[in-house]
Image (cartoon, rainbow, N blue to C red):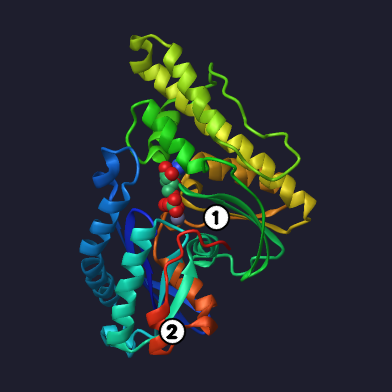
Amino acid sequence: MLILGVDTSCDDTSIAVLRIVARKFEILSNIVSSQEKIHQKYGGVYPTLARRAHEANLPLVLVQALKRSNTNGIGVGAGAKINPRDIDAISVTIGPGLDPCLWEGVNFVKDLAYKFNVPIIPVNHIEGHILANWLPPVDENIKFPAICLVVSGGHTQLILMRKIGKYQILGETRDDAAGECLDKTARILGLPYPGGPAIAAEARDYGGLTSIVLPRPMLRSKDYDFSFSGLKTAVLYDYKKRSAKERKSKKYIQVMCAEIQQAVIDVLIKKTIRAGKDYKVKTILLSGGVAANKELRAQFQQRAKKENFRFQVPNPKFCTDNAAMIAITGWFHRAKALKSARQIKNLQAIPNLRL
Ligand code: KG4
Ligand code: ZN
């Protein structure tokens, strides 16, 4: 079976082709066209520009995704080339995400579904991030129940997962998402967008003990919620009290970045491990753009091992937004495919879709 995945939830236009044979997954292509350069000067995503970029990019990214599938040398028959008509279903992100961006993807796949005469499988972007943990290469045997921590630019959620498709949100951020906090604090410090990788690079170059102490918001609260806006405010206060010379110094930026990163990591790990113990889970799954962070991955791995949890995190390229995760989620939900012309016509983008 061949599934075409499409994601336009935020500022990346992505299309992937996933082949499934005897429950084995093979990513034939996973093209991600980033809009980083467009949004850099605004320090965040500008929805109208993002929509326009998706509109321009989608047809080009589709051609690239199909071409790459072919150059990977895997056809439907031996040596055969993948023809768009070989696609069996299209899965698309319908939410959560930015309204104009989601609609661009949804309308694009409606046209494709009509042209290729294939069903559409609507996908929740957050579930896509979670199920990226099943993309190859993978430990096939993820044991349930599991706790998933989804940390991205738009979301920070702690989710109890009893099986694929069965989720309970235990906690989430009350204000900014973890990635949003990194993006905003990076902006205060004059670092480029997206802030997460920029802060990680500065912190790595420093690598020592920090002389700045930032708060770890809600570290000891009894619930599973998060809050990151206080951390952002603390960074702003510290920055403002420094002299112009110190603010610009490499040392200050590096020490501050190391402390911001560690403050976020401390809160994420502590709450996730506590939830894992409270719910007696077997596995901890990490996902979302912030899960690409090397330090977070390493520290999580260490703590999870110490506490006897299995730990799983996707390859970094499947942590940030991509369509391979949307294609695999579509496969797991193929029974919910929309087949009739009327169902497809009525498909809607849902910007505030919940798990
Ligand atoms: O999942 P994603 O690509 O998009 C959303 O669904 O939001 O996540 C983007 C977020 C941004 O806030 C970005 O700064 C953060 O993920 N991010 C990182 C890293 N790479 C991306 N944060 C920390 N370290 C990274 N290496
Ligand atoms: Zn995402």
Q: Nearer the viewer, residue 169 or 67?
A: 169
Which secondary structure lies at badge 1? loop
Residue 99 pos. (x, y %):
39, 59
Residue 234 pos. (x, y %):
52, 23
Q: Is mark 1 within 8 Å of ligand 1?
A: no
Q: Quadrant of residue 91?
A: bottom left
Q: Residues within 10 Å of mark 1 (few under 14, many from 20)?
A: many
Q: Is residue 90 above or below residue 232?
A: below
Res. 74 mark: none
Q: Quadrant of residue 60?
A: bottom left
Q: Is residue 184 above or below residue 252?
A: below
Residue 128 pos. (x, y %):
50, 64
Q: Residues within 10 Å of mark 2 (few under 14, many from 20)?
A: few
| 330 displayed left or right of 270 | left
Res. 313 mark: 1
User: What's the amino acid at mark 1?
Assistant: Val
Q: Quadrant of residue 78?
A: bottom left
Q: Is residue 254 above or below residue 349?
A: above
Judging by the rendered image, the residue that carries numbered circle 2 is 343
What residue is at 37 percent from the left and 31 percent from the top? 187
Residue 44 pos. (x, y %):
35, 42
Which secondary structure lies at badge 2? helix
User: What's the amino acid at mark 2?
Assistant: Gln
Q: Quadrant of the N terminus?
A: bottom left
Q: CA distance from mark 1 to mark 2?
A: 35 Å
Q: Quadrant of the C terminus?
A: bottom right
